[in-house]
Image (tube, grey):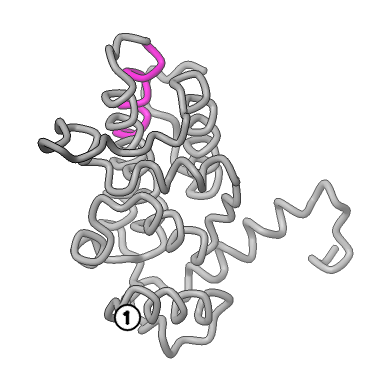
Amino acid sequence: MTAGNLSPDDSSVASRTSRRALLRTLTATPVAVSVVTSPWSEALATLHREHDDEPALLCRSREGRSLSRVRYHRAESFFETLEAGILTSNAETLYYSGIVAQLALSGHLLDIGFEDKWCARHIGLRVAKSLAYANATGLGHECPGMGRLAVVLTPYWKWNQPPRWGEPEPDDGGFTADQIRPLLRALLDHVHRITGHPRPRGWRR
């Protein structure tokens, strides 16, 4: 059976297979995404122009894959704090949410072959930008709620400091902890599926 005649229920299998085939071409040899022919080239070139970023070099490696898994597991660990309901303010909840989202998205970007130094230099703590680059490279998490939350969380350090005198507090977009948790849970589950990383040891739904 070919990808063209798969049933609707098999579409995710075809997607994973094509993704694996594409990722194999990014292993061991750096490829300038601005010149490589791939489903991502146009979207990445657009993002590079919009943000005035230097082109990323995608190169998958065992080290990158290992770091990707660590980031995903750390995201799950920080999410446990959100689930525990021990945070005392909405600002603290948003700060932790930014950490969770950025770690999870970083897990995908590193798995795809982005260099960690490139991400630190060009993305930093901007969750919305991280989500844009992740979706441009096959994450496929086009969730409107997560998109709105990513904007609120960008950059997430702003939720970990008091506003300066005379400055308004950052806009929380009306998000509450009960609204945030399912959005982040869906993101983590999606990163788990798309990267194939195992759940952390002792993980429970």
Q: Amino acid at mark 1?
A: Pro
* Quadrant that contains the N terminus: bottom right
Disc 1 target residue: 55
Q: Which residues are magenta?
A: 73-84
User: In percent of the image, x 41 and y 81: which residue is there?
Assistant: 33
Q: Residues within 10 Å of mark 1 (few under 14, many from 20)?
A: some
Extreme residue in the bottom direction = 35
Residue 102 % position (x, y): 33, 45
Residue 71 % position (x, y): 30, 42
Extreme residue in the left direction = 165
| Nearer to me, 28 or 137 | 137
| Nearer to me, 95 or 74 | 95
In reply to whether residue 76 is colored magenta, the answer given is yes
Question: Residue 49 appears in which quarter of the rendering?
Answer: bottom left
| Nearer to me, 89 or 109 | 89
In this picture, residue 180 sits left or right of residue 115: right
User: In percent of the image, x 49 and y 40: which residue is there?
Assistant: 192
